[in-house]
Image (spheres, grey):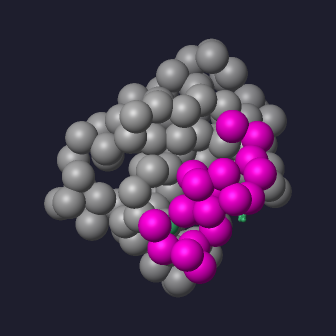
Amino acid sequence: MVSDCIFCRIVAGEIPADVVTSGERVIAFRDLNPQAPTHVLVIPREHHETVGALAAEDPKALADVVTVAAEVAAEESGGSYRLVVNTGAAAGQTVGHVHAHVLGGRSLGWPPG
Ligand code: 5GP
Ligand code: ZN
């Protein structure tokens, strides 16, 4: 656990979150500032900074992130959804613990901003 990481602290139960589902390797909870009717963050329990690092260091956890994202979207938005992993400050990553945004429940524009 990284003590100054808010998502590690959510995993540890130190910061409350609206948890949607929780498993051995991943946890999913609602985004504090939702951008769509469904806006859920899926994260590995262990701290990895980026999706590339997660793929290299724990590919099973990455597979679980994607599987749980699909399950959440099936449950909440009929299986139509966008899975976004912002990586690096210029791409909008503000939390340095890899997280996949599951966005759905409305029509989503393309290209993204
Ligand atoms: P990023 O900009 O890094 O791709 O996404 C970070 C996301 O985390 C943002 O959408 C933001 O609203 C969300 N977020 C930041 N702090 C918290 C928190 O303490 N709890 C929850 N549930 N979401 C958070
Ligand atoms: Zn962390």
Residue 6, percent from left and from top: 64, 68
Residue beneath the point at 69% across and 59% down: 14
Q: Measured along the vertical axis of the image, is residue 40 above or below residue 88?
A: above
* Left or right side of 94 for 99: left
Does 41 sit left or right of 100 as displayed? right
Q: Is residue 110 magenta?
A: no
In depth, the one of 45 and 38 nearer the eye is 45
Where is residue 71 shown, x and y percent of the image? 51, 22
The region drawn magenta spans 1-19
Q: In the rendered structure, does residue 15 fall within the stretch colored magenta?
A: yes
Q: Is residue 20 above or below residue 90?
A: above
Task: Identify the residue at horizontal 39%, vertical 29% (top origin).
Answer: 67
Answer whether residue 107 is visible to the viewer in this image: no
Furthest toward the left, the residue is: 56
Residue 83 x/y as whole percent: 51, 44
As rendered, which of 99 and 47 lies closer to the eye? 47
